[in-house]
Amino acid sequence: MELYEAKKIKGTDQSITLAMEDIVDNAAAYLKKELPDPEEDLAIKLWKEKKGIKPKTKGSVTRPDEVAARTLRNWVRLYKKRRQDRAGG
């Protein structure tokens, strides 16, 4: 969505396919930033309880797999529909 909104890709299969590496890189960065890491959360909890060492850095995430452009377009369509449904529109 960010790449599309920044006009770095178009909503076509060809454009999405050509940009798939960038799409996957953006997805990996998003996952690293947004998803909780249960192991890291436990390490922080133990450290705060003085039952473990201070954790160093946030863990890494597995790089998402590439998907077909059509699949990605369907996911985006469903995401937008769900957002619209939740907004009552």
Image (tube, helix red, strand yellow):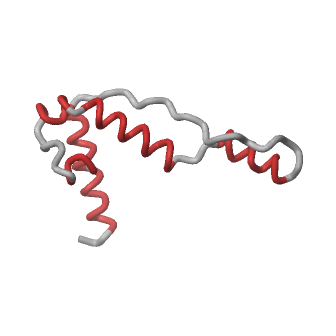
* Quadrant (top left/top right/bottom left/bottom right) for the C terminus: bottom left
Q: For the point 13% across and 35% down, which residue is it?
A: 15
Q: For the point 49% across and 50% down, which residue is it?
A: 34
Coordinates of residue 46 in the picture (x, y in percent)? 82, 46
Q: For the point 64% across and 41% down, which residue is it?
A: 57
Coordinates of residue 68 in the picture (x, y in percent)? 23, 29
Say left or right for 58 vs 68: right
Q: For the point 74% across and 48% down, which residue is it?
A: 44
Say left or right for 27 vs 1: right
Closer to us: 29 or 68:
29
Given the current orientation, which residue lies at the most extreme bottom position? 88
Check the image and report above or below for 13 versus 81.
above
Coordinates of residue 21 in the picture (x, y in percent)? 29, 30
Coordinates of residue 16 in the picture (x, y in percent)? 18, 35
Q: Quarter of the image holding residue 86?
A: bottom left
Say left or right for 86 vs 16: right
